[in-house]
Amino acid sequence: MGKVGLFDLEKHFAFYGAYHSNPINVFLHMLFVWPIVFSTLILLYFTPPLFNLPNLGFSPFGYNVDLVLNIGFFLGLVSASFYIAFDKKAGFLAALLNFCCWVSSSYVAGRLGFSLAWKVAVAAQLICWTGQFIGHGVFEKRAPALLDNLFQAFLMAPFFVLLEALQMFCGYEPYPGFHEKVQAKVDSEIKEWKAKNQKKSS
């Protein structure tokens, strides 16, 4: 059964889906959203720690990684908490991906150093955001959701992309009938948006 209010997954996913109904735009978001998360965490690796604690160093597979409990860690923790609150199974997978991104981005940032890491991360951001804007402008023909809802665009997009991929490749849905209900809401929102555009142009 769906949740209500802030954690109404049907409502939020339908809002996202109304901006991502074109298959090519959907593919471009699947391709670029998580790399944006990864490269953002590289940039945030160099922010100061939030707590007066020593860095967490460990060596998986013989590689030394210094983990800093900074704003990147905090944002990842908040995001993971939201994802799990929305749906335990897909949310846990998204939280695990978040954790893997944090650890691996910390390793990459530590190995590259401040100057090179920033150049690589900024280049990745430019490529990924350009790809997404092309997806919206050329294929979706609708402005991205970030212009209407920053919460959706930055915090929830990685989870929704994962949920979309799980549906597409595994047939997963948080509960029976979820995708049917979401699609009905998506169709309604797109119809309403097109009607508003027609009024503006007439």
Image (cartoon, helix red, strand yellow):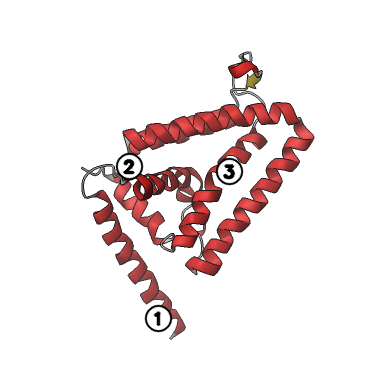
Q: Which residue is label 1 attached to?
A: 199
The three-letter code of the residue at mark 1 reads Lys
Percent position (x, y) of residue 160? 41, 47
What's the distance in space between the residues labelled 2 and 3, CA to CA?
25 Å
Percent position (x, y) of residue 201? 46, 83
Q: Nearer the viewer, mark 1 or mark 3?
A: 3
Q: Which residue sits at x=39%, y=74%?
A: 194
Nearer the N terminus, badge 2 or badge 1? 2
Other-residue count near label 3 (Cα within 10 Å), few / some / many at <14 / 14–19 / ≥20: some
Q: Nearer the viewer, residue 4 or 84?
A: 84
What's the distance in space between the residues labelled 1 and 3, CA to CA?
38 Å
Q: Which residue is label 3 attached to?
A: 35
Give the image quarter of residue 120: top right
The three-letter code of the residue at mark 2 reads Phe
The N terminus lies in which quarter of the figure? top left
The C terminus lies in which quarter of the figure? bottom left
What's the distance in space between the residues labelled 2 and 1, CA to CA?
33 Å
Percent position (x, y) of residue 31? 53, 50
The vertical placement of 9 against 138, above or below, is above
The three-letter code of the residue at mark 3 reads Pro
Q: Which residue is label 2 attached to?
A: 7
Other-residue count near label 1 (Cα within 10 Å), few / some / many at <14 / 14–19 / ≥20: few
Give the image quarter of residue 131: bottom right
> What kind of element bears circle 3?
helix
Nearer the N terminus, badge 2 or badge 3? 2
The vertical placement of 117 against 13, above or below, is above
Q: Nearer the viewer, mark 2 or mark 3?
A: 3
